[in-house]
Image (cartoon, helix red, strand yellow):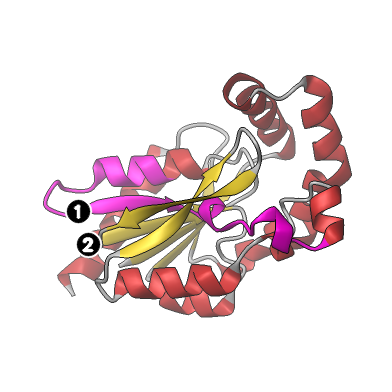
Amino acid sequence: MLIIVCGGTGSGKTTVSQEIRKILPKTITTQIISMDAFYKKREYMDEDIYFKHNFDHPNAFDWPLMLESLTKILNKENTEIPIYDFSVSERTDKFETIIPTDVIIFEGILSLYDAKINELADIKIFVDTPDDERFIRRLLRDKNERGRTDDNVIGQWRNTVRRMHRMFVSPLKAEADIVVPWYKMNQTAIHAIKGAIEALIKK
């Protein structure tokens, strides 16, 4: 089973994915795969993407590899996916072996963007969080976890992130089966998703 969790930067996608994984019965094996693994290597990015550090544009991602990898995993094949290094904003030459589980949670800012990948999904979720809250979360995360400066985070938000969200990410709510408000922990939504997953597994 493939569950897609989509939403803007700082929306809470990873938290929602972890909560889904946590709440499912231990008899259901589950893992989370981040879309970040499928950024193109910089040498293959368009110049306007690379030089503007516009990592929120669809053209920053390796869609054929993403589709191939998810298809193989859902066909119960062990699959190698790239490892992304946030400290240098680059996809490395190293790979992680993914062993198939009962449930795959695939999360990312544009994870609902590709029609062929959407066709693979059993449940499509969009995490909807106000822009100001997302900005604060991104600022704190990038400073504390990725060594970025205030000016770097604010500049990227103003120059690309906010605009890409409005152009490409926000419209993806229309592709979702479930839209989850996530200004704060929404356990009601998580339990509803759990019920939907269990019902599909029983089928």
Observer-nearest residue: 48 or 164? 48
Left or right of 177: which side holds 147? right
Amino acid on which disc 2 is placed = Asp
- Residue contact between numbered discs 2 and 1, judged by CB atoms under 8 Å: yes
Observer-nearest residue: 29 or 48? 48
Left or right of 98: which side holds 7? right
Residue 114: percent from left, percent from top: 59, 73
Residue that label 2 marks? 102
The quadrant of the rendering that contains the C terminus is bottom left
Name the residue rendered at 72%, 58% in the picture: 43
Residue that label 1 marks? 29
Give the vertical position of 118 relative to 96 (above or below): below
Where are the magenta residues, as a range?
17-46
Of the residues under marks 2 and 1, which one precedes in the sequence? 1
Amino acid on which disc 1 is placed = Thr
Observer-nearest residue: 178 or 78? 78
Residue 185: percent from left, percent from top: 46, 33
Observer-nearest residue: 87 or 177? 87
- Choose top left, top right, bottom left or bottom right for residue 104: bottom left
Left or right of 67: which side holds 9? right
> Regarding mark 1 in the picture, which secondary structure is present there?
loop
